[in-house]
Image (cartoon, rainbow, N blue to C red):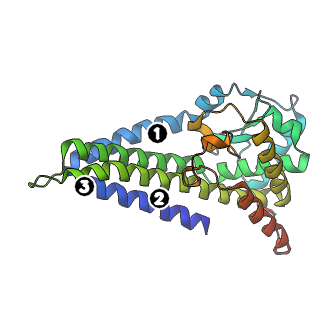
Amino acid sequence: MNTMRTFLLMGLLTVIFVIVGQMLGGQQGMITAFMFALLMNLGTYWFSDKIVLGMYRAQEIGPHDSPMLFRTVNRLSERAGIPSPRVYIIPEAAPNAFATGRNPDHSAVAVTQGILNLLSEQELEGVIAHELAHIKNRDILIGTIAATMAGAITMLARMAFFFGGGDDERPNPLAMLLMMIVAPIAALLIQMAVSRSREYVADETGAHIAGSPTGLANALRRMEQAAHAHPMDAQPATAHMFIVNPLKSGQSVMALFSTHPPTEERIRRLEEMARSAGRGFGYN
C-alpha cells in the first residue's frame, strides 16, 4: 500500500512538472531547468555518503571497535540479501541513526554513540534492520528523484513568472504569480509525503529483516522520548535521513511539511504487525 502511494506521489510530481512546463512554454527552457536540477541532485546523490558522514564527523569502525554493532549489521545484511554496508559511529549523545550511499554496493550505516548507550540489543537490531531496509529499497535514489522533480518545478515556476508563457497572448500576471507560489509548495508537500511514505515501508521491511517488529517499536518509543529531552544538533537539509526527526519540535512547523510520519503512528503500525505475527516474519 505504501509502495503504491509512493508511485502515485511521484506521478503527481511529474504531472505538476508537465503542467508548469506547458505554462512556461518553450520546450527548451523546460528541459534546461530540469537538467540543471537533475545535475545538482545527482551530484548530491553520487557523493551523499561522503558529504553527510563528514558533516556529522562519523568515524568508520571495524569488528574490534564495537563487536556487537558490527556483528548485528553483518548478520542482518545477510538476512536481507544485501552486501554488508560500511559501519560508522557518530560522536553524538542524542540517539539516532541513518543510512546513506547510492546503492546497496556503495552504502553505509551510521549510528550515534547515544543509541549504543540507550538501546538494548533487540532494539538496536530493529533500528539497524530499518536502515538496511532503506538501502534494500533504494530509498536514497527515490528521495533524490523526488528532490530533482521538486527542484525542477520550483525553477520552472520562477521562469514562467519572469519570462511568461509561450502563447501569443500576454499571460495573466496574477495567475503566473499564483503558480510561482503554489507550484513549489505543492511539489514540496509531495516530496515530504514521499519521505514519510518511505519511512513506513522501511519500518515494515525492517521488521521482516529483524524477524520481529517489537524491537523497532520499543526503540522508536525510547528514541522519541530522548530526542525531546536532548535534541540533536542536526542540519534541516539532512533531517529526513535519520530514523527519528532530530530537530527540535519547534522547528517542525506543521505535519504536512514533516519528513517523518508521527512516531506514535509508526509504533501503532508495528504493534499491529506484532499482533499479526502468526502469519510469519523474517527472510527465511
Rendered location of residue 51, percent (x, y): 58, 29
Q: Which residue is mark 2?
A: 10
Q: Which residue is at 61% across, 34% downward?
A: 49
User: In screen coordinates, is 196 left or right of 165?
Assistant: right
In depth, the one of 230 and 78 nearer the eye is: 230
Residue 175, numbered circle? 3
Q: Is residue 148 visible?
A: yes
In depth, the one of 131 and 188 nearer the eye is: 188
Disc 1 packing (10 Å; few <14; some 14–19; many ≥20): some
Rendered location of residue 195, percent (x, y): 58, 52
Residue 141, numbered circle? none
**Reading the chain from its start, which is encountered first: label 3 or label 2?**
2
Which mark lies nearer to you, 2 or 1? 2
Which amino acid type corresponds to the residue marked 1 in the rendered image?
Leu
Q: Quadrant of residue 265?
A: bottom right
Q: For numbered disc 2, what is the local secondary structure?
A: helix
Q: For numbered disc 1, what is the local secondary structure?
A: helix
